[in-house]
């Protein structure tokens, strides 16, 4: 077992703190951008909680549910949209 992981594979200690700070920084940055772009706060609230609905995938099957849940909680899709949308708007 290496330092920074528990027997379950979960992050502990300094790694856990770093991951939480990373998430807090991302959240603060996105809230600031949303505020600067003058988006609807009702839409923000709906979109904020939308990934949590992905747990419904577990009703079909545990493997499928885990896949859907992990995909919904990944940063790849939001970062891709954040990168592509301004370029599409410019055209």
Image (cartoon, helix red, strand yellow):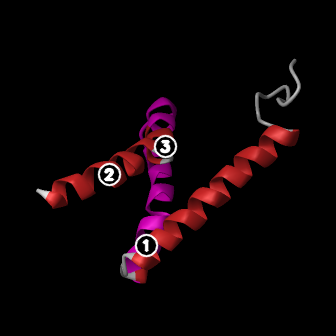
- Which numbered tag is attached to residue 81? 2
Residue 53: where, in percent of width, then height? 46, 57
- At horizontal 45% and vertical 69% (from top left) the residue drawn is 33
x, y percentage for residue 26? Answer: 58, 57
How many marks the image carries: the answer is: 3
Circle 1 SS class? helix
Q: Which residue sits furthest left?
A: 91
Magenta region includes residue 66: yes
Say which mark, if any, is on residue 34: 1
Residue 86 vertical placement versus 19 (above, below): below
Tag nearer the camera, 3 or 1: 1
**Which residue is located at x 46 percent, y 34 percent?**
67
Q: Quadrant location of the C terminus? A: bottom left
Badge 2 density bin: few <14, some 14–19, many ≥20, Cα 10 Å: few
Q: Of the numbered discs in the image, which one, if any, rests on residue 74?
A: 3
Q: Are marks 3 and 1 in contact (CB under 8 Å)?
A: no
Check the image and name the residue furthest to the front: 90
Q: Is residue 37 left or right of residue 35?
A: left
Q: Which mark sits nearer the N-terminus, 2 or 1?
A: 1
Under tag 2, what secondary structure? helix
Q: Secondary structure at mark 3?
A: loop
Residue 57 colored in magenta in the image: yes
Crowding near the residue tagged with mark 3, few <14, some 14–19, many ≥20 C-alpha atoms within 10 Å:
few
Left or right: residue 61 compared with residue 39: right
| Closer to the camera in the image, 55 or 13 | 13
- Specify the segment rendered in magenta: 42-67
Q: CA distance from mark 3 to mark 1?
A: 19 Å
As measured in the structure, the alpha-carbon distance from the residue carrying label 2 to the one carrying label 1 is: 14 Å
């Amino acid at each position: 077992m290496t330092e920074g992981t528990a027997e379950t594979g979960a992050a502990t200690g300094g790694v856990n703190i770093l991951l939480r700070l990373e998430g807090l920084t991302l959240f603060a940055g996105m809230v600031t951008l949303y505020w600067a772009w003058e988006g609807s706060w009702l839409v923000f609230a709906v979109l904020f909680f939308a990934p949590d609905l992905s747990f419904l995938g577990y009703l079909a099957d545990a493997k499928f549910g885990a896949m859907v849940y992990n995909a919904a909680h990944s940063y790849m899709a939001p970062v891709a949209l954040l990168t592509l949308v301004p370029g599409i708007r410019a055209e």
